[in-house]
Amino acid sequence: MEPLDQSLSIDAHKLNHTAKVINKFVPQGSILERLMNFAASVPDFRRCDKGNIRHRLSDIIILMILGRTCGHVGRSDIIAFGKYNLNKLRKMGMLKNGIPSEATLCRVENGIDDPAMADSMQAFAENFHN
């Protein structure tokens, strides 16, 4: 028997480029993608016609949800969480203008209808769980 000719076998010397693709790939239907779609579906209650809005409402909502999921309850803790993870959040296409201020987080928290948001989050969780 002759030994296998490894140079002609099934691309044994080819570089493996799949790691680069996997790092940038977000699977369809992932919880992050669904969460981003949910946050984008929340109607913006702010004065959109004035042109002075620096941060998308969906970005702020995602920041608050991710921060609270990681155990950061207060606004200053959420801002610190956002600063620490800013590069990761920007790679996801969020927070292009940086982290929102504490006053912005306060306005968003006070402007969102809490019972309606809780109902929407419950429907989101049930939908994802099913």
Image: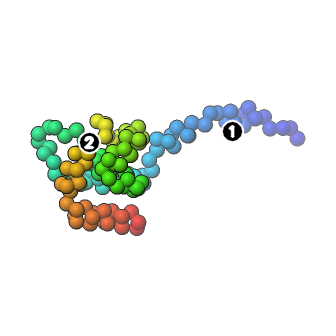
> In which quadrant of the rendered view does residue 129 lie?
bottom left
Circle 1 sits on which residue?
10
Residue at position x 22%, y 45% in the image: 103
- What kind of element bears circle 1? loop
* Residue 78 visible from this viewpoint: yes
Where does the N terminus fall, quadrant-wise?
top right
Q: Amino acid at mark 2?
A: Ser
Residue 106 x/y as whole percent: 22, 50
Residue at position x 51%, y 43% in the image: 22
Residue at position x 19%, y 60% in the image: 113
- What kind of element bears circle 2? loop
Precedes in sequence: disc 2 or disc 1: 1
Q: Amino acid at mark 1?
A: Ile
Circle 2 sits on which residue?
101
- As drawn, the label of residue 91 is none
Residue 7 x/y as whole percent: 73, 32
Farthest-out residue, right: 1
Above or below, 68 relative to 3: below
* Residue 35 visible from this viewpoint: no
Disc 2 to disc 1: CB gap under 8 Å = no
Dot 2 surroundings within 10 Å: few (below 14), some, or many (20 or more)? few
